[in-house]
Amino acid sequence: MDHEAVLAEYDRQIRREARSDSPGARVERVGAVVRQTGAAHDWNGIHWADVDAATADATIAEQVRYYTALGREFEWKLHSHDRPSDLADRLRAAGFVPEPPETVMVAEAAALPMEPELPEGVRLLPVTDAAGVRLMADAHKVAFGEDEAGLGERLAKRVLTQLTETPDTIVAVVAMAGDEPVSSARMEFCPGTDFAGLWGGGTAPRWRGKGIYRALTAHRTRIAAERGYRYLQVDASDDSRPILRRLGFAPLSVTTPYVYDGGVAPAGGETR
């Protein structure tokens, strides 16, 4: 895979030409900025900013005023190759708080395993309705604990909206051990692009290390390939990065969510 060529296409297709990831959100191109604005449970934030040392501070201040006026917490999705080189320092100086960085990893779908290999007693259940979304929220809770339960509920609301209003943009699945949801994941499609995004995959502690994350990835890879998507993209945590490397994913960049709440109650949207 040509790293520079794929990075250029990622920046163009996913960031500069971003599409809304929720039926209730809109993407705007205002001056140097590509941003998304939606409801409180949607992701609100900056996909792309064409700024330099002379314009960065004013552009940051403009976005703070915009989202604050709407009463929205928002995220500036910073990538390690973004410019100017001190943009992270400028965001912190403006009141943004960084969350843990993740590695943007990409692979060609055709080169990845596509047959899920599940541990005994575990099956994959496609999510298509409210009952399935409830299982996703329960899986999120057992994977991440009570502290993240609220985020799981808000994410579930967003997923249900997508499944109901734009079902061609999302595939969701829950791993079930008997009647217990032990992991969940989704894939979001960007029609008209080469990329499908993999999200989720958190697994209940006692089921980790048994291949469920790999199985969820293979399941979604097959669907992406059938739909004609060339690349799979993941914002990988430290836990999932080694698994993805072994599967054939390569690091493309590092992304850090810089969050500005300005005293606004947390929106709770999953970082992009």
Image (spheres, rainbow, N blue to C red):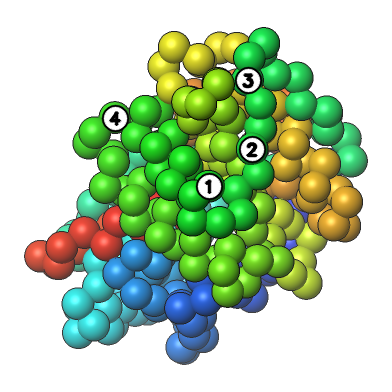
Q: Are marks 2 and 1 in contact (CB under 8 Å)?
A: yes
Marks 2 and 3, how far apart at CA: 10 Å
Name the residue that disc number 1 marks. 132
Q: Earlier in the sequence, mark 2 or mark 1?
A: 2
The residue that mark 4 highlights is 145
**Type of the residue with mark 2:** Leu
Q: Amino acid at mark 3?
A: Val
Residue at mark 2 to residue at mark 4: CA–CA distance: 22 Å
Res. 189 image quadrant: bottom right
Residue 222 seen in render:
yes
Residue depicted at x 43% and y 22%: 204
Contact flag, marks 1 and 3 (Cβ < 8 Å): no
Three-letter amino acid code at the position of disc 4? Gly
Task: State which mark lies toward you, 4 or 1.
Answer: 1
The residue tagged with tag 4: helix, strand or loop?
loop
Alpha carbon separation for disc pair 2 and 1: 8 Å
